[in-house]
Image (cartoon, rainbow, N blue to C red):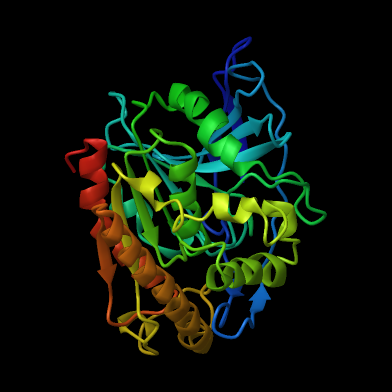
C-alpha cells in the first residue's frame, strides 16, 4: 500500500490518497468467527477473534475545542471509499471510520451509520468484506459511515476503564463528538439513520434512545434488545465476558445496578416512539445461505460452525426480538418486524436485510433511491 499526501495546507485537513495493490486488504491474514453459541440457551461460547490494534494517526487537525472530535486524516482508498481517522477526546485516541461517499456528493446528503457485529470491524467479519455493500450503495445518495473499531464494546460508555480494551466512551464519541465534525468534512445534511447487526443490533437501539433526535430511523438485525433481565443479561455477559474476556461490570456496573436497566431498549422502548423502526430476525434453521453448494469467502467461518453455532445464536435472538415486538405492540409504537422462517446468524441474511430495510431507511432520510 502506498500513500501520497495531497492538498495539505496550514491549519487544514490532511488528506491522503491511498493506492492498494490487488492483493491487499483484510484477505486471509485475519479470520474470525465470534461464536456465541447458546448464549442464552446454555451460556456456552466458542470464540476466536483476530484483534487489530487501533493506531493513533499524526496529522494536521480540522476543528478544535473540548468535547469536539477532530478529523486528523482522510485516506482515499477508492473513488467512493474513504478511511477517516478521527480523534476522540472522550477516549483519548484516534478512531478509524470506513466511509462510502454518496453517488452525487455535490449536494449535502444524509448519513447512515452502519455497524458491524461483535468484532467491531477489527476482524474480517465486516459489511465491506462480507456483503455487496459497496455495489449496493453505488447509486445511493447517502454517506455510509462504519466504525472500524469497537470489538466487544456494545458501542456504549463504559463506567470504568477495562484492562483489555482501555477507555470505552463510544456513546459519547458516536452521538456527541463525531456527528458535527464528520458532517463538516463530508458536507453532510445532518440527517441521520443508524443500523447494526448482532451485538450492534442492540447498540443501535440503545444509541437512538440515549441520543433523542439524532437519528430518524433505526434498523436492527438479529439482536437482543433486552439487557437487564436474566435472559438478556446472560446474552450480554456471554458476549463481553466469555467471547471478549472483559469484565462486564466495567461496562454498566453491578449486575443488579441501574446501569443495565438504563441501557435496556426493551425497558426503555417508549423512547423509540417517533423513529422509523425496522427490526428483523431469522429462526435459526438452515436456509438458502447455509448450503454446501454455495461458494464461500475465504474469510467466512466453516459451514458447520455457521449452521450449528449460528443457528443457536439466531434462535436465541429470535426470542428476544419476538419479546420486543410484543413490547412495542403493547405501547402502540409502530415498527416493521420481519421474522424469517429460516436463517442462521450469518452475513448472507444480513445483506438481504439491509436491502429489505433500505426503502424504509431511505424514506426516513428523505432519499429517493
Name the side, left or right, on which 156 lies relative to 115.
Answer: right
Residue at the (55%, 59%) spot, across then down: 23
Above/below status of 293 relative to 105: below
Residue 236, how many percent across, how many down?
60, 66
Quadrant where the C terminus is found in the figure: top left
- Residue 65, by quadrant, is top right
Residue nearest the viewer, comparing 114 with 14 = 114
The one nearer the camera, 232 or 112, is: 232
Location of residue 281 in the rendering, given as x and y in whole percent from the top left corner: 35, 71
Residue 127 lies, with reference to residue 186, above or below; the image says below
Outermost residue, left direction?
A: 368
Say whether residue 40 is visible. yes
Q: In the shown orientation, is residue 290 left or right of residue 369?
A: right
Tell me: residue 305, above or below residue 65: below
- Residue at 53% across, 62% down: 199
Can residue 29 be seen?
no
Q: Quadrant of residue 152?
A: bottom right
Q: Residue 25: give x, y in percent of width and height.
A: 56, 56
Q: Extreme top residue here?
A: 10
Side (left or right) of 115 relative to 32: left
Residue found farthest to the right:
163
Q: Answer left or right for 99 relative to 85.
A: left
Residue 280 image point, x, y percent = 33, 66
**Number of numbered discs overlaid on the protein picture:** 0
Amino acid at each position: 500500500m502506498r500513500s501520497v499526501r495531497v492538498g495539505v495546507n496550514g491549519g487544514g485537513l490532511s488528506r491522503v490518497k491511498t493506492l492498494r495493490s490487488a492483493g491487499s486488504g483484510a484477505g486471509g491474514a485475519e479470520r474470525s468467527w465470534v461464536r456465541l453459541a447458546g448464549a442464552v440457551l446454555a451460556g456456552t461460547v466458542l470464540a476466536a477473534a483476530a484483534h487489530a490494534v487501533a493506531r493513533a494517526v499524526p496529522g494536521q487537525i480540522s476543528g478544535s475545542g473540548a468535547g469536539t472530535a477532530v478529523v486528523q486524516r482522510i485516506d482515499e482508498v477508492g473513488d467512493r471509499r474513504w478511511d477517516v481517522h478521527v480523534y476522540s477526546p472522550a477516549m483519548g485516541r484516534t478512531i478509524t471510520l470506513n466511509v462510502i461517499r454518496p453517488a452525487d456528493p455535490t449536494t449535502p446528503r444524509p448519513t447512515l451509520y452502519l455497524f458491524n457485529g461483535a468484532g467491531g470491524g477489527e476482524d474480517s467479519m465486516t459489511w465491506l468484506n462480507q456483503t455487496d455493500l459497496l455495489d449496493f450503495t453505488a447509486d445511493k445518495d447517502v454517506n455510509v459511515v462504519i466504525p472500524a473499531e469497537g470489538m466487544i464494546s456494545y458501542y456504549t460508555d463504559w463506567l470504568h476503564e477495562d484492562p483489555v480494551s482501555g477507555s470505552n466512551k463510544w456513546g459519547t464519541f458516536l452521538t456527541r463528538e463525531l456527528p458535527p465534525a464528520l458532517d463538516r468534512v463530508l458536507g453532510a445534511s445532518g440527517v441521520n439513520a443508524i443500523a447494526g447487526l448482532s451485538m450492534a443490533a442492540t447498540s443501535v437501539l440503545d444509541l437512538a434512545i440515549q441520543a433523542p433526535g439524532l437519528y430518524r430511523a433505526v434498523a436492527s438485525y438479529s439482536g437482543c434488545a433486552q439487557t437487564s433481565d436474566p435472559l438478556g443479561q446472560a446474552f450480554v455477559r456471554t458476549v463481553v465476558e466469555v467471547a471478549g474476556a472483559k469484565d462486564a461490570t466495567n461496562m454498566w456496573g453491578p449486575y443488579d445496578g441501574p446501569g443495565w436497566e438504563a441501557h435496556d431498549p426493551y425497558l426503555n422502548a417508549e423512547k423509540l416512539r417517533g423513529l422509523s423502526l425496522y427490526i428483523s430476525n431469522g429462526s435459526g434453521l438452515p436456509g438458502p445461505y447455509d448450503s454446501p453448494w454455495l461458494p464461500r469467502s475465504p474469510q467466512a467461518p466453516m459451514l458447520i460452525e455457521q449452521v450449528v453455532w449460528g443457528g443457536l445464536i439466531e434462535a436465541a435472538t429470535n426470542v428476544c426480538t419476538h419479546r420486543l415486538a410484543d413490547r412495542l405492540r403493547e405501547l402502540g409504537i409502530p415498527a416493521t418486524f420481519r421474522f424469517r422462517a429460516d436463517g442462521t446468524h450469518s452475513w448472507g441474511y444480513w445483506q438481504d436485510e439491509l436491502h429489505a430495510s433500505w426503502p424504509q431507511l431511505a424514506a426516513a432520510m428523505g432519499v429517493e433511491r
